[in-house]
Amino acid sequence: MENPQDNPDVAKIVRNLMVLNGAFIMSVLLLLAVVLVLRKQGAERPEVPVVSYLAASLGPVVLMISLILAPSLDSQARKAAATQDRDQIDLHLARGLVSKNIMLVALLEGAAIANLIVFMLEDRLLCLAVGGAVLLAMAAHFPTMDHAARWIERQKQLIQDAFEQGVQ
């Protein structure tokens, strides 16, 4: 089997995914800059910051959802790729990686943005910290050619194992 990194179509897909992930991350960083510059200085902080607590709880919930959702998205990518021609499997798996990555990073982006907006409104550092932690989780999903190649090879191995066991 050829190395996924040697396939120009796969490399193009991964490069496009890098740009897309960069855009997701930059949108949160841009909002962070705007929030830090424009947030109300000395704004009245509510006695019971219910919105802050809700936003802050959104971060861990979304992180857990992304951890639960990732294997399911991997499985869907394998099932779709397993029905394709052997010489096109890398390309189909790369497309599956794109779908998985977009879903997970967009989910995380929503939690990060929500926390930054609530930080701006209620001036709670907890929301800034949660937004920053979720931003780091987004950055952890940033694709590299090596990561994509390892992921594709792992999925191909799992497809092969499933065929050998007679399970699809």
Image (cartoon, helix red, strand yellow):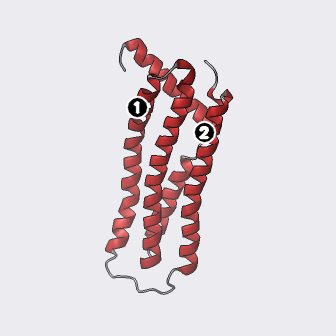
Secondary structure at numbered mark 1: helix
Quadrant where the image shows the N terminus: top right
Q: Quadrant of residue 27 in the image?
A: bottom right
Whole-percent x, y for residue 122 in the image = 42, 78
Secondary structure at numbered mark 2: helix
What residue type is disc 2 on? Ile
Q: Does the image show residue 153?
A: no
- When the figure is inspected, residue 102 is found, relative to residue 149, above or below; the finding is below
**Do labels 1 and 2 touch, CB within 8 Å?**
no
Q: Nearer the viewer, residue 111 or 80?
A: 80
The residue positioned 63% from the left and 21% from the top of the image is 2
Whole-percent x, y for residue 142 in the image = 58, 47
- When the figure is inspected, residue 52 is found, relative to residue 105, above or below; the finding is below
| 1 or 2: mark nearer the eye | 2
Q: Quadrant of residue 164 in the image?
A: top left
- When the figure is inspected, residue 159 is found, relative to residue 131, above or below; the finding is above
Q: Is residue 40 left or right of residue 20?
A: left
Whole-percent x, y for residue 150 in the image = 58, 30
Query: Mark 1 and mark 2: span between their CA atoms?
Result: 20 Å
- Binning the other alpha carbons within 10 Å of mark 1 as few (below 14), some (14 to 19) or many (20 upward) gives some
Q: Which mark is residue 13?
A: 2
The residue positioned 61% from the left and 33% from the top of the image is 10
Q: Nearer the viewer, residue 132 or 39?
A: 39
Q: Residue under label 1, please give it.
A: 75
Q: Is residue 58 left or right of residue 129?
A: left
The residue positioned 41% from the left and 44% from the top of the image is 67
Whole-percent x, y for residue 149 in the image = 60, 31
Q: Does the image show residue 12?
A: yes
